[in-house]
Each structure stands twice: as structure tokens, then as C-alpha cells.
């Protein structure tokens, strides 16, 4: 198990149901994708989905955290940001986030992929 450097949830929604799906989005090097993905998830109105931004790049943790905090407040959507102490690589960051996920079902979504109403 990798050591956690950061694990914070933003936009806590009162009386939100327990998550049935944890969507794990690994981020490395780029911080622009969460700015498009989070509004798309908010439009789906699925409070039982846990969104986990798994940051595997210490250089972008602060920016991702700030973006998540701002977007969670703007869209009324709960978003979790997690980061390990050390870079784990693609499979490592996915396993790290999976260990922290709260839902019984996992969806691994690359940061440059997007979900829409047509997909559910």
C-alpha cells in the first residue's frame, strides 16, 4: 500500500446517498481535463457516483485541488482528490485510488475521456 499524501473531498452534499460507483480518473501532467469532466458529471445528476481525481504528479496537486474545490462549489457536486507521496505510474495510481474508493463498483476513466447521458 502506498502512503497517502493528500485525500480530501470537496462539495460535500448533505444527505447524499452512499456511492454505488467510484469513478477513478488518474491525472498526470495536465490539469485541464477535470475542468471539463466535472461539469459533465454534474449534468448527469448522479449523487450516488463517487468521483475520485487520483493525482500522480506532485507538481499539479495544488492546481487540481483548487480546481476541484471551485468546481464542486460551482456545480454542487462532491469530488474527491487523492494523491500518493510518490509517483506510482499509471497502474499504481489506479490501484492506489481503488484501495481508497468507497463504492462496491469501480470505473477507471482516462483523464482525456468523457462520459455523456448517452453512455448511461
Image: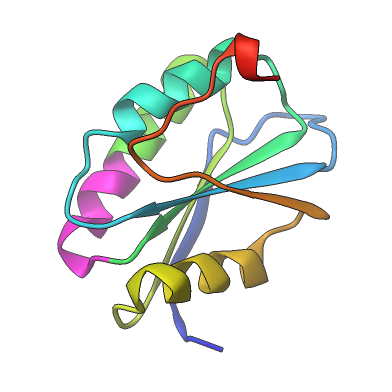
Above-or-below relation of 112 to 60: above
Please, what is the dominant secondary structure of the magenta stretch?
helix
- Identity of the residue drawn at 74% across and 43% down: 21
The region drawn magenta spans 57-66
Where residue 60 sits in the image (x, y, percent)? 20, 56
Quarter of image, res 35 = top left
- Identity of the residue drawn at 42% across and 45% down: 110
Where residue 76 sits in the image (x, y, percent)? 55, 20
Q: Nearer the viewer, residue 95 or 59?
A: 95
Please indicate, yes or no, whether residue 107 appears anywhere in the rendered image. yes
Relative to 96, 89 lies left or right = left
Q: Nearer the viewer, residue 53 or 12?
A: 53
- Identity of the residue drawn at 84% across and 42% down: 18
Tell me how many marks there are: 0
Please indicate, yes or no, whether residue 5 appears anywhere in the rendered image. no
Relative to 47, 81 lies left or right = left
State yes or no: residue 74 in magenta.
Answer: no
**Is the N terminus in the top left, top right, bottom left or bottom right quadrant?**
bottom right
Where residue 87 sits in the image (x, y, percent)? 29, 78
Where residue 78 sits in the image (x, y, percent)? 58, 34
Q: Nearer the viewer, residue 11 or 44?
A: 44
**Is the C terminus in the top left, top right, bottom left or bottom right quadrant?**
top right
Relative to 83, 101 lies left or right = right
Amino acid at each position: 500500500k502506498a502512503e497517502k499524501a493528500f485525500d480530501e473531498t470537496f462539495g460535500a452534499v448533505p444527505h447524499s446517498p452512499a456511492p454505488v460507483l467510484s469513478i477513478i480518473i488518474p491525472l498526470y501532467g495536465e490539469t485541464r481535463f477535470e475542468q471539463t469532466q466535472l461539469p459533465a458529471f454534474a449534468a448527469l445528476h448522479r449523487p450516488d457516483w463517487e468521483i475520485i481525481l487520483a493525482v500522480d504528479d506532485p507538481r499539479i496537486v495544488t492546481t487540481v485541488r483548487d480546481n476541484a474545490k471551485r468546481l464542486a462549489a460551482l456545480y454542487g457536486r462532491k469530488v474527491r482528490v487523492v494523491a500518493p507521496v510518490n509517483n506510482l505510474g499509471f497502474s499504481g495510481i489506479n490501484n492506489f485510488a481503488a484501495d481508497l474508493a468507497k463504492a462496491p463498483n469501480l470505473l477507471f476513466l482516462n483523464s482525456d475521456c468523457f462520459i455523456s447521458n448517452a453512455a448511461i
